[in-house]
Amino acid sequence: MKRRIVGYHKDEAGDWVADLECGHCQHVRHNPPWINRPWVVTPAGRESMLGYELNCKHCDE
């Protein structure tokens, strides 16, 4: 189920986690070449993705 990003925080390992509108969270790592999300490494990039919809696996369950 698609849910909008409403904020971000870092986990214990220092990786970025998106806070979703449903209350669940999802990692948004930039780990090329496997995961390519360069927007996550800058404040402006993260801000530009607020409202973007990610698939929430927890809501799908």
Image (tube, rainbow, N blue to C red):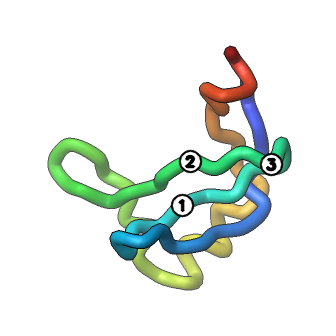
**Residue drawn at the location 66% of the way across and 74% of the way down:** 47
Residue 16 place in picture, x, y as percent: 47, 67
- Amino acid carrying mark 2 in the image: Gln
- Amino acid carrying mark 1 in the image: Val
- The residues tagged by marks 2 and 3 sit, at their Cα atoms, a distance apart of 10 Å
Q: Is 35 situated above or below 1?
A: below
Direction top: furthest residue: 61
**Residue drawn at the location 59% of the way across and 72% of the way down:** 9
Q: Is 26 situated above or below 44?
A: above
**Residue drawn at the location 64% of the way across and 39% of the way down:** 54
Dot placed on the residue nearer the N-terminal end, 2 or 1: 1
- Amino acid carrying mark 3 in the image: Gly
| Mark 2 closeness class: few <14, some 14–19, many ≥20 residues within 10 Å | some
Q: Is residue 41 left or right of residue 48?
A: left
Q: In this view, does 10 lie to the left or right of 32?
A: right
Residue 24 place in picture, x, y as percent: 71, 45
Give the labeled residue for mark 2: 26
Element type where label 2 sits in the image: strand
The quadrant of the picture occupied by the N terminus is: top right
Residue 28 place in picture, x, y as percent: 47, 55
Quadrant of residue 6 within the rendered picture = bottom right
- The residues tagged by marks 2 and 1 sit, at their Cα atoms, a distance apart of 5 Å
| Mark 3 closeness class: few <14, some 14–19, many ≥20 residues within 10 Å | few
Element type where label 3 sits in the image: loop
Tell me whether circle 2 and circle 1 mark residues in contact (CB < 8 Å): yes
The quadrant of the picture occupied by the C terminus is: top right
Q: Which mark is residue 23?
A: 3
Give the labeled residue for mark 1: 17
Dot placed on the residue nearer the N-terminal end, 1 or 3: 1
Q: Is 7 situated above or below 1?
A: below
- The residues tagged by marks 1 and 3 sit, at their Cα atoms, a distance apart of 12 Å
